[in-house]
């Protein structure tokens, strides 16, 4: 990022929804380190107070405890804001299958509230967390932004509807938007607990307890695991880009390589064994496949590289080493 772009960030007021969550809190931290004025917005449905406690000491950070399902809350949060990084959502395919109504209320109703509030406040650009789940039953690899399939879960439907609404708000109200289709993001601050915990922190916690992680299926399903710092880079580029062709677009946010779940567990055991040799002997258990799971996920990041100047720095191995180091320090 050049000096002009950094100054652009320092002179901006940026609202981060889902600020107490995994990705949101990392974005807030990165922006504050640059010198931006940051407003955090969260209702702690899935986020944690501990993720924002260190940020509250920074005079450039303001936190609003509120709910995106309340339009008045959204209007208050957007007042005086230059850019919105909308991360707030109810994630998890299984959660959406178990409770599609709440997932829709938050991910569609809350998203629409944030679009309306951003429009009314004159926000310069609305950047939002889209999802690789939008590719649905498309079997094409790698995934390219213009070719999607039918959604395989209520969660996937909500994230696709977000893209449709964002496109419509540009056409109807001239609100600039950028959608970032996240691919299996992992890294520091990701919650290992709960029924809907992501696979990497969940497996790490189980390995550290010498418990056998359960792989759904035969372990040959693959994912484009994406370290948090790559995601931060994409969000910052989406803010500072002055390429008109780059705005009002949707981008894969990933590294561009896929790893099977079997390969993932081998790497996790190897990197955790550096801290505790006994972890190398923990067995893996296999269970039934989960409903709504996409068999394989691999992103083409060519569009982001060309239009935004994206240059992901962390592949699965370098990202996992950083993540494991953090997990061991904070979760052991």
Image (cartoon, rainbow, N blue to C red):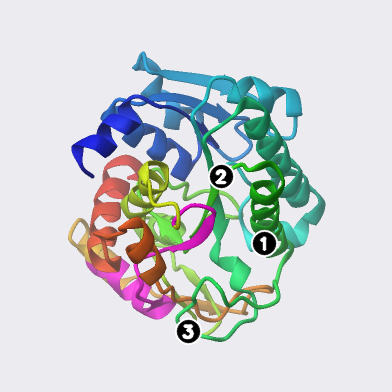
Q: Are there few (<14), some (14-19), or many (20+) residues within 10 Å of tag 3?
A: few
Q: Quadrant of the C terminus?
A: top left
Secondary structure under the numbered disc 1 in the rendered image: helix
Q: Nearer the viewer, residue 9 or 65?
A: 9
Secondary structure under the numbered disc 2 in the rendered image: loop
Which percent across, then down, holds residue 229? 31, 50
Which residues make up the magenta segment? 246-270
How far apart are the two marked residues, 2 and 3, measured between alpha carbons? 29 Å
Q: Inspect the magenta stretch and tell me whether residue 263 lies in it.
A: yes
Q: Quadrant of the N terminus?
A: top left
Secondary structure under the numbered disc 3 in the rendered image: loop
Give me the residue at 71% from left, 67% from top: 153
How far apart are the two marked residues, 2 and 1, measured between alpha carbons? 18 Å
Which percent across, then down, holds residue 131? 56, 60
Question: Upstream in the sequence, badge 3 or badge 1?
Answer: 3
Which residue is farthest top? 59
Question: Upstream in the sequence, badge 2 or badge 3?
Answer: 3
Mark drawn on residue 176: 2
Q: Inspect the magenta stretch and tell me whether residue 284 lies in it.
A: no
- The reply to whether residue 182 is in sight is no
Q: Nearer the viewer, residue 192 or 223?
A: 223
Give me the residue at 61% from left, 82% from top: 138
Which percent across, then down, holds residue 196? 59, 55
């Amino acid at each position: 990022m050049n000096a002009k772009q950094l100054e652009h960030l320092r002179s901006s007021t940026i609202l981060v929804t889902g600020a107490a969550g995994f990705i949101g809190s990392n974005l807030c931290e990165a922006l504050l380190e640059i010198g931006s004025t940051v407003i955090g917005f969260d209702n702690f449905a899935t986020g944690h107070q501990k993720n924002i406690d260190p940020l509250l000491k920074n005079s450039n950070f303001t936190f609003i405890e509120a709910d995106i399902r309340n339009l008045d809350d959204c209007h208050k949060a957007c007042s005086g804001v230059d850019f919105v990084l909308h991360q707030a959502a109810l994630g998890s395919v299984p959660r959406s299958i178990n409770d599609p109504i709440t997932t829709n209320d938050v991910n569609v109703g809350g998203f629409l509230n944030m679009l309306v509030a951003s429009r009314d406040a004159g926000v310069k650009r609305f950047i939002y967390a889209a999802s690789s789940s939008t590719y649905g039953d498309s079997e094409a690899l790698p995934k390219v932004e213009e070719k999607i399939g039918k959604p395989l879960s209520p969660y996937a439907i909500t994230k696709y509807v977000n893209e449709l609404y964002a496109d419509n708000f540009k056409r109807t109200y001239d609100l600039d938007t950028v959608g970032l289709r996240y691919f299996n993001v992992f890294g520091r601050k990701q919650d290992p607990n709960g029924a809907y915990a992501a696979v990497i922190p969940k497996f790490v916690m189980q390995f550290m307890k010498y418990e056998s992680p359960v792989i759904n299926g035969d372990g040959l399903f693959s994912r484009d695991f994406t370290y948090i710092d790559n995601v931060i880079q994409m969000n910052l580029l989406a803010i500072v880009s002055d390429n008109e062709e780059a705005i009002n677009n949707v981008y894969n946010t990933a590294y561009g390589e896929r790893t099977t779940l079997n390969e993932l567990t081998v790497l996790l055991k190897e990197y955790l064994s550096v801290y505790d040799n006994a972890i190398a002997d923990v067995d893996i258990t296999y269970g039934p496949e989960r409903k709504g799971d996409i068999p394989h996920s691999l992103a083409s990041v060519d569009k982001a590289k060309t239009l935004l100047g994206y240059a992901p720095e962390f592949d699965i191995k370098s990202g996992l080493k950083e993540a494991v180091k953090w997990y061991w320090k904070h979760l052991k």
